[in-house]
Amino acid sequence: MNSTLQTGLLVLERLQASGVPLGVCELARDLGKEKSNVHRVLATLSAHGFANQDSETRKYRLGPGWVQRPGDAGTRSRRQAEAAWWAKT
């Protein structure tokens, strides 16, 4: 299994579950990963629109590139609201 891909998926799942923006240190601690690895993964996710960083707090939340996964319909409206919020900023 590709550990970088696995870390990326864990980061996305954690951001989704959180409902509030999270920092690199929080994510690394929660996932048991090195801060440098989480930072690199977040940079890649951000570059592709899957995560966004708040310029003031430097914390991350899901970006508009995050799409609904099968069986995950309950959080679709929250994702749409987050995407709309990021589109305004």
Image (spheres, rainbow, N blue to C red):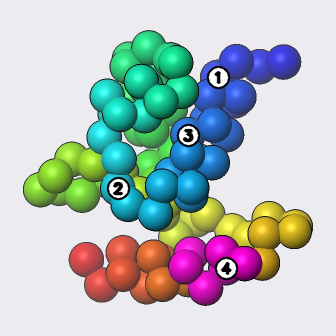
Instruction: Name the residue located 63 percent from the left edge and 37 percent from the top edge.
Output: 10
Q: In the drawing, does residue 58 fall left or right of residue 21?
A: left
Residue 50 visible at all: no
Residue 75 lies in the magenta stretch: yes
- Residue 25 falls in which quadrant of the image? top left
Where is residue 3 drawn, in percent x and y?
A: 70, 18
Q: In the drawing, does residue 65 fall left or right of residue 29?
A: right
Q: Residue furthest left?
A: 56
* Real-space Cα separation, disc 1 to disc 2, in angstroms: 21 Å
Q: Secondary structure at mark 4?
A: helix
Q: Could you tell which of marks 1 and 3 lies nearer the N-terminus?
A: 1
Q: Residues within 10 Å of mark 4 (few under 14, many from 20)?
A: few
Q: Which mark is residue 76?
A: 4
Q: Which mark is residue 48?
A: none
Q: Is residue 72 above or below residue 6?
A: below
At label 1, which amino acid type do we have? Thr
Q: Is residue 89 above or below residue 14?
A: below
At label 3, which amino acid type do we have? Val
Q: What residue is shown with label 3? A: 11
| Front position in the image: 15 or 58 | 15
Q: What residue is shown with label 2? A: 21
Q: Could you tell which of marks 1 and 2 lies nearer the N-terminus?
A: 1
Where is residue 66 drawn, in percent x and y?
A: 61, 63
Instruction: Name the residue located 36 percent from the left edge and 75 percent from the top edge.
Output: 86
